[in-house]
Image (cartoon, rainbow, N blue to C red):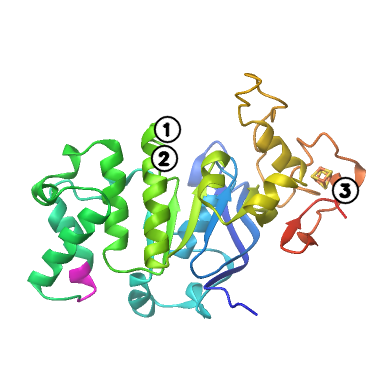
Amino acid sequence: MREPLLEIKNLQKKYPIYGPLGKLFPPKTYHKAVSNMNLKLYEGETYGLVGESGCGKSTTGRSILGLVQPDSGEILYKGKDLTKLSDAEFRPLRRDLQMVFQDTLSSLNPRQRIGQLLEEPMIIQGMGDANERRQKVLDILKMVGLAEDHYFRYPHELSGGQVQRLGIARALIIDPKLIVCDEPVSALDVSIQSQILNMLTSLQKEMNLSLLFISHDIGVVRYISNRIGVMYLGSLVEEAETDELFANTLHPYTQALFASIPDFKKKERKVSLSGELPVYTDEFKGCVFHTRCPHACDKCRECAPELKEVIPGHKVACHLVK
Ligand code: SF4
């Protein structure tokens, strides 16, 4: 059986909700940002994690990089539980695990030139001498479609698309195995989005990278992913290979999400998802989607369905899907 490169098991992360007097008093309750999240990512695949803002996608992605400390659960990378490692133990793995942010510019030092920004991760990882590092920076600039003379420029001189290319270059420069891409194209125009997605796809194949691609945009996720996990209120409600998910959409939330994609032939939207994500606390009972589901019954309000494999490789969490 194929071993996953990364496996997330029962990941949980809660955030406190304070009353009107803020942190003067203990939290009123806790919001479950990630709850019982399970996911496997294989070498060389792109796994798309999709869902509305606030469903826990970014918290999941950031937990992998150690940017968020989960409350419980395991994140196994090549069999090692990342949540149990000390900073010193995690440091060598940082070379394998990288992230591309939505707002790359704010994650960069504005006083550093692009050449320095790209060389810095290699210096931290003790890679090569000055000449080798300079050559690698020039090579990576070319790979991501930036010019040699960008080496001496500052990040604020770049366009939005070029900044994202720089973010990808910075993630790639130390030869990672897995990149978490957190909404990397959401702030870009559609034409630039497709250029960046095409570039990511070809770099992924060339370098045999694994990508966890996080987005609220199902169209973007469909374009780039081999498999898709649909997330709602902190956990997966459906997971399948991309073609299977679109041909055979089973969970009512996924159906509503797909129906929200504009159908340009009909020039109208079909069913839309009404209301917003509820606050998910310990007091919340039943299926996570029952407050918005058109098929919710008493059982749905009392008892949460498990994520079960209903067709080989296709998992769904819904009482109605057998
Ligand atoms: Fe809807 Fe019930 Fe299925 Fe949840 S379990 S998605 S509420 S039908």
Q: What is the distance, in whole Å, between disc 3 and disc 2 at their CAs?
A: 37 Å
Point 21% across, 54% down: residue: 142
**Mark 3 or mark 2: whose residue is earlier in sequence:** 2
Instruction: Please state if 123 lies on the left or on the right of 173 as rendered.
Output: left
10 Å crowding of disc 3: few (<14), some (14-19), many (20+): some
Residues drawn in magenta: 122-126
Instruction: Please state if 322 lies on the left or on the right of 51 as rendered.
Output: right
Q: Is residue 124 magenta?
A: yes
Task: Pinpoint residue 124: horizontal percent, then vertical percent.
Answer: 21, 71
Three-letter amino acid code at the position of disc 2: Ser
Element assignment for label 3: loop
Quadrant of the rendered image holding ligand 1: top right
**Do residues under tags 2 and 1 come within 8 Å of each other at their CB atoms?**
yes
Point 37% across, 64% down: residue: 206
Looking at the rendered image, the disc whose residue lies closer to the viewer, 3 or 2, is 2
Q: Label 2: which residue? A: 194
Q: Label 3: which residue? A: 320
Q: Label 1: which residue? A: 190
Instruction: Please state if 107 lies on the left or on the right of 241 as rendered.
Output: left
Element assignment for label 2: helix
- The total number of labels drawn is 3
Task: Pinpoint residue 22: horizontal percent, then vertical percent.
Answer: 50, 41
Question: Would residue 281 be seen by someone viewing this image from the given angle?
Answer: no
10 Å crowding of disc 2: few (<14), some (14-19), many (20+): some
Task: Pinpoint residue 192: horizontal percent, then vertical percent.
Answer: 36, 36
Q: Which mark is on residue 37?
A: none
10 Å crowding of disc 1: few (<14), some (14-19), many (20+): few
Q: What is the distance, in whole Å, between disc 2 and disc 1 at their CAs?
A: 6 Å
Tell me which secondary structure the magenta stretch mostly adopts.
helix
Three-letter amino acid code at the position of disc 3: Leu
Quadrant assignment for the N terminus: bottom right
- In the rendered image of this protein, does residue 42 appear above or below residue 219? below
